[in-house]
Image (tube, rainbow, N blue to C red):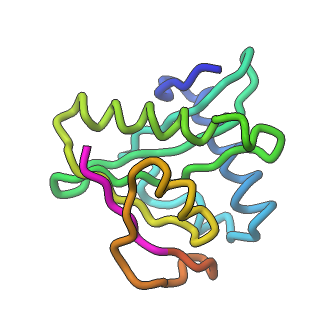
Amino acid sequence: MTVKIVENSTELADAFFIRKTVFVEEQNVPLEEEIDQYEEEAIHFVMYDNGVPLAAGRFRNLDGYGKVERICVLKDARKIGAGKAIMNKIEAYAKDNGLHKLKLNAQTHAIPFYAKLGYQVDSEEFLDAGIPHKTMIKEI
């Protein structure tokens, strides 16, 4: 398994395919909310296994901290370390770019996953696309 930063339109299409499958098809997030105005400024990541895209995420630099967004793993690739691999690559990218604080909005069912990676809840519960979330932060 390899996680890479998206460098071309094919890789970006792979990231969007994974996001649409997980968020739009599985979780019923409206497509117009999933693909948003931040796509062009974000750094996108995709995890491949023998050329097959399995997981994706994106990252933005906001006011001196890193914003981790749209972390998703296809159903068949869950529980094999794909989410952790994407997160490790994003965290390494952030650190390499001089950022030491990361923030993300976690779906509440995913909080234990992010907590294992060192993130701490930093907000009350709120709804995003009709799904309960909490903001989490991590110093790196």
Q: Furthest-front residue in view?
A: 116
- The answer to which image quadrant residue 22 occupies is bottom right
Chief secondary structure of the magenta portion: strand
| Viewport quadrant of the N terminus | top right
Q: Residue at x 62, y 77 (%)?
A: 131
x, y (%) of residue 132?
A: 58, 79
Q: Position of residue 7 (x, y in %)?
A: 48, 23
> Residue 28 vs residue 35: left or right?
right
The boundaries of the magenta stretch are 134-140
Residue at 48% over, 38% down: 44
Q: Residue at x 25, y 34 (%)?
A: 95
Q: Position of residue 118 (x, y in %)?
A: 39, 51
Q: Is residue 122 above or below residue 4?
A: below
Task: Name above or below for residue 37 compared with residue 85.
Answer: below
Q: Is residue 27 left or right of residue 81?
A: right
Instruction: Tell me the residue at 71%/21% (across/down).
Output: 49
Q: Is residue 9 above or below residue 117?
A: above
Is 125 positioned to the left or the right of 131 in the image?
A: left
Where is residue 102? Give x, y as percent: 30, 52
Split into 4 quadrants, where in the image is the C terminus?
Answer: top left
The total of numbered circles placed on residues is 0
Residue 136 is one of the magenta-drawn residues: yes
Q: Quadrant of residue 46?
A: top right
Q: Nearer the viewer, residue 24 or 132?
A: 132
User: In the image shown, does 20 or 135 lie closer to the viewer?
Assistant: 135
User: Outermost residue, right direction?
Assistant: 76
Horizontal side of 99 relative to 13 (left or right) equals left
From this view, report whether residue 101 is shown above or below residue 104: above
Residue 129 picture quarter: bottom right
